[in-house]
Image: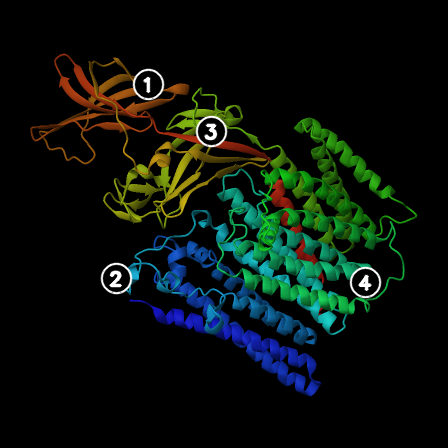
Amino acid sequence: MIHETIGSVGHLFVIISFVTALLATFAYFKSTQSANEIENDWKMTARVLFGLHFIAVIVVAASLFVIIYNHYFEYHYAFTHSSLQLPTMFMISCYWEGQEGSFLLWIFWQAVLGLLLMIKNPKWESPVMTVFALVQTFLTSMILGVIIPWIDLKIGSSPFLLLREAQPDLPVWSMQPNFIPKDGRGLNPLLQNYWMVIHPPTLFLGFALTLVPFAYLIAGLWKKKLTEWVMPALPWALFSAGVLGIGIMMGAYWAYETLNFGGYWNWDPVENASFVPWLVLLGAIHTMIAHKTSSSALKTSIILVIATFILVLYSTFLNRSGILGNASVHSFTDLGLSGQLLLYMGTFLLVAIGMSIYRWKDLPKDQKELGTYNREFWVFVGAAVLGLSAFQLTFTTSIPVYNKIAEAFGVLSNIALPADQAEHYSKIQIWIFLAVAILSGIGQYVWWGKIKQSTTFKPLVSPALAATLLSVVFINIGKIYTFSYIALLWSSLFAVLANFKILWFLIREKFSLVGGALAHVGLAIMLIGILFSAGYSKVVSLNRSGFAISTKVEEFTKDNNKENKENLPLWLGQGAQMQDYLVTYKGRRIEVRGHKGYFNKNDFEIIEGDFHAVALKNIERDGVKIATKGDTVTVEPENTYYELEFKNEEGKAVSLFPRWQVNPKMGTAISPDVKHAWNHDIYTYVSLDPRLAAEAGSEKQWSQTEAQTVTTGDTLFINDFVAILKDVTRVTNVDGVELAENDAAVQANFQVLGKNSQQFTLSPIFVIKGGMVAMPAFESEETGIKIKFTGINPQAQEFGFAWNTTQQELIVVKALEKPYINLVWIGSILIFIGLFIATYRRLKPATAA
């Protein structure tokens, strides 16, 4: 049965949300234009309309989740992004995997913020909410999904399209008009991560929050409150920077945990598109704080606040227009919304620029010139450097846009993004952030009156000397010989010491003032972490086995066999030295839904084409029975985890579980696992699994059978192993066989010697039951040996055995050491704490404004 009602309700309320946002915009506008006695009527009408808009948005959001959660695959959105096997957590990720869902998330956050603004600051409500409601009107139009027939114009893309509406040309509709797929395509493997449950909502809340200072600015220009807008807008700007920054760092940690490029930031165009508005917003915050004594800071604030919001819209255009389709792994495909996105961005850009020009002559003039010992001067310089960083990133990231513009004018443009984007951006940004670090130290000293014309810059001598001494120590210990790295190290250490000194002073004076200094300390610590974790990351999985992974594939042979040398082959059960650890591959593991941890994949028979498996033995974990032999359990068959045991010289062991996900519909995703230490991470992933890479579940290829008769103590040479028959003993229990009184069973025990003094056991069994003989084969995955009894001569004490061999189970592992990477996360946390402390400090003045 096709569930058309829920989709119709969802689409109806999308239209209601659009109409109520549009009407609320008009009512709020009329409220700002009317006399006081009428103004209240228009304001009350606008409030009711925006309240109805909020309710409509909630209904739309709930309708889409019902469709996803209940697996209504007759809907294009559910079919495209979800599947039956997804747990609830990842169904939430499905919600914003698609463009329509991510727009809806953005709309939801702005609706919530609109309600808060209606309550928070009534003196500014009408003009601010006029801007807010207008932005909501544009955003809701993105999911409107309405076609105006007489001009054939499509407005928005609806998340409530049925599959037959979204893909009407499929032949199946002519045969089965009510066809419903049994399953969906599933969620992108890369998004099946808990960070993708919380990262997008945080990032979109940050995007939504950038609208608040912009709305206050436009309201201030509109109502000629040219300086008053700053005070109520500032705490929102600070909070926005904190939330948006957290969203960006969540994305960085997701990349570190999920992707296998070896880091947390790759200067991907979509990464840049969210990072650039954050940089500009930080510059705006600094100039907004300095506006009281400098009209130059006020003018710069106007420019930067406008730029922040427009850059958020521009990043949306880059990400959702499909223009970065060949340049970024994160970008969406084009849904035909490019024109709407450009109209959205262009409207607010023209309005903001037009109003700024109109009011520019009315802005206050400076009474004094900025000088070297003037704190506003250093704020302006810092904002300019942040702006320079944003400009360089935007200029290069926008290369695909330049090509499209050239094509629109009939010019063929083949400008390409840098081949090595990480190197291109890093070699420029390192100098910019070196300057940011130094300026953060100087600026704090000047801001808090520690540097004056009478003292010149003498107070900075002690942190500069201390930074120099520490740099010499770190340079010698870390063997840092690259000049740019040395310069960044010194500037970051100087920033830590200078800002920490100010931080200590402010803690003693008044704790609520520490926000800025704490954020600057965090920035400097993060830069040190980036320097070491990125600049001095090194491969520790060096291949000294003499085994060449490939002599033909260019990926391994290029650059003087670089990948052959840096990828370590691991045979099942056999250890290999990696840095200070003995690493042993323990086998493939699988998840059982509802239970923590991983389970031996060989203990289950996975049902093909289903998400269930049959237990081949009794499964227990920490004394708790997970399954009895023959039970059917729910598993995640697409995910294969590899247990890698890392054992240090003291014998302490910890296991990592890097992942391969082979998804026939979406492709293969390789995810790392990380061993954390206080001063480094060991970042490890399986770069090659020959069995899965060839064909999931392919049968093993066994050698021809060999046979030999031996006695106790004799040696067999099998598959590069030495196997010694230690004894043959009678056994009373045989797995899967009930032995009666007249039955008998014996077990041979071979001791198998491998590399690195490792030992394995082969235990074939000879069973006599009811006068019948059974000689089941014993298979050892660690050695690639399958052996069985062929006969017993009790008088001569001779035993016959036959065996086959196969390629020993092998995976190829790459591991990198990331020194002092924890400083990246610690520094970022300090930045956000500092921003939130600064937000809290400025809440009361904003309320009074």
Percent of width and height locating residue 589: 36, 39
Tag 4 residue: 292
The residue carrying pointer 3 sits among few (fewer than 14), some (14 to 19) or many (20 or more) residues within 10 Å by Cα, namely: few
Mark carried by residue 554? 3
The residue carrying pointer 1 sits among few (fewer than 14), some (14 to 19) or many (20 or more) residues within 10 Å by Cα, namely: some
Callout 4: helix, strand or loop? helix
Disc 4 or 2, which lies upstream in sequence? 2
Placement of the N terminus among the 4 image quadrants: bottom left
Tag 1 residue: 721
Q: Which one is in front, 229 or 391?
A: 391
Residue type at the position of mark 1: Phe
Q: Give me the C-alpha separation between circle 4 and circle 2.
A: 72 Å
In the rendered image, the vertical position of residue 237 relative to residue 749, given as above or below: below
Percent of width and height locating residue 307: 68, 58
Disc 3 or 2, which lies upstream in sequence? 2
Callout 3: helix, strand or loop? helix
Disc 2 or 1, which lies upstream in sequence? 2
The residue carrying pointer 2 sits among few (fewer than 14), some (14 to 19) or many (20 or more) residues within 10 Å by Cα, namely: few
The residue carrying pointer 4 sits among few (fewer than 14), some (14 to 19) or many (20 or more) residues within 10 Å by Cα, namely: some
Mark carried by residue 781? none
Residue type at the position of mark 4: Lys
